Image (tube, rainbow, N blue to C red):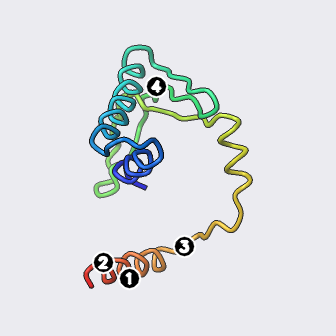
Amino acid sequence: MTKKEIVREIAEQVNLTQLKTKEVVQKTFDAILDTLVEQGRIELRNFGVFEVKQRAARKARNPRTGERVDVPPKNVVTFKPGKKMEERIRQMTNVPVLSADEELMETVGSQSEDSE
């Protein structure tokens, strides 16, 4: 699902224009990002916790040359789902797991249907 699809669904549910809904959704995403940058953590009850953590410096190897390379520390965002999210995901049944070939065929099939 894309942001555009999320906006479309919300707009239909709350009877707002897609333009206004897109603005609200974008402001929500911006607020989450700003909070992560300023405070390093945001907890959304019943959804989960986003947190900025620092990944330690490490040694790696360049796969082409085999040369050892120093990788500096960097900040990454982690997400830990809330209880409600975990419960709902666990309750999912009949979730199709597609192979890469099946995903490609679905994509190609939907594109050819769209062009008709």
| Residue to which mark 1 is pinned | 109
Label 3 – label 2 distance at C-alpha: 21 Å
Label 1 – label 2 distance at C-alpha: 9 Å
Q: Quadrant of residue 84?
A: top right
How many marks are shown on the rendered structure? 4
Label 3 – label 4 distance at C-alpha: 32 Å
Q: Nearer the viewer, mark 3 or mark 2?
A: 2
Residue 49, placed above or below residue 115: above
Position of residue 18 in the picture relative to residue 102 (left or right)? left
| Residue to which mark 3 is pinned | 98
Q: Residues within 10 Å of mark 3 (few under 14, many from 20)?
A: few
Please report whichever mark, 2 or 4, sits nearer to the chain's N-terminal start: 4
Q: Residues within 10 Å of mark 2 (few under 14, many from 20)?
A: few
Q: Quadrant of residue 69?
A: top left
Residue 50, placed above or below residue 63: above
Residue 7: give x, y in percent of width and height: 38, 46
| Residue to which mark 2 is pinned | 114
For mark 3, give the secondary structure. loop
